[in-house]
Amino acid sequence: MSTAAAVLVLAGALLAFIGSLGLVRMRSFYERVHPPTMGTTLGTGLILIGSMLYFSALESRPVLHEILIGVFMTLSTPVTYMLLVRAALHRERQDRGS
Amino acid sequence: MSHELSAAVLWLAQLLLGLAMAFALYRLLRGPRAHDRVLALDTLYVDAMLLVLAHGIAAGTALYFEAALVIGMLGFVSTTALAKFLLRGEVIE
């Protein structure tokens, strides 16, 4: 059971790593908004599922409080990214205007 | 045997998350404009939260879960405040 949890955590870490690599490699800001979402959605989800599996096996009772982080990240990430892209659009329009 | 294998896999996952934080830090220092830096800061927060979670699993204590939750909440609040500042020039109107 702990090996399955470790493999899930590794998969999530790999997704977060690829997302950050994309943050370095992509050329424009609007391209760079996309890669980190891999880490914030599926990466976080896989690591949280791995954590739930591991601690449920360790304490031999269902441990589900990781769902709290999952729900919070799912709700907060779109809000921040929408605000950020709106700010970027606003700043570019301001640059072009002046 | 299985325990050693999972410990090695968890160590590799923490290494990957540390590298991810290094990449986000590079974009934070390098980023041509302010919104690039805010995006990099948000990614840095998320990667740090995942690293704390992975370290908690490797250490075998549920104590690190609370720390990860607090990092996630502070990351959301700080990124929202910075984006609002970029959009309007002030945080609270």
Image: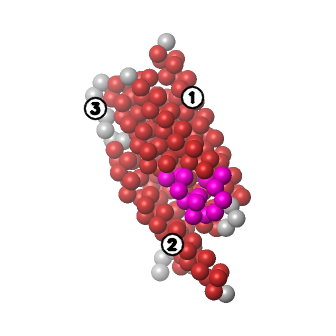
Quarter of the picture containing the N terminus of chain A is top left
State which mark lies toward you, 2 or 1: 2
The residue at the far bottom in this view is A98
Q: Are marks 2 and 1 on the same chain?
A: no
Give me the residue at 39% from left, 28% from top: A54
Q: Earlier in the sequence, mark 3 or mark 2?
A: 3
Seen in the picture, residue A25 relative to B80 is either above or below; the reply is above
Query: Local crowd at mark 1 within 10 Å, few (<14), some, or many (≥20)?
Result: some
Q: CA distance from mark 1 to mark 3?
A: 25 Å
- Secondary element under disc 2, as helix, strand or loop, is helix
Residue placed at 66% from the left, 59% from the top?
Answer: A27
Q: Which residues are magenta?
A: A23-37
Give the camera-side residue of A13 and A55: A13
x, y percentage for residue B89? 57, 79
Q: Which residue is mark 2?
A: A86
Q: Circle 1 is placed at which residue position?
A: B11
Q: Answer yes or no: is residue B48 visible.
A: no
Residues at discs 1 and 3 both on one chain? no
Q: Is residue B64 left or right of residue A33?
A: left
Image spot of residue B1 (x, y percent): 49, 12
**Number of numbered tags placed on the structure image:** 3
Mark 2 belongs to which amino acid?
Arg
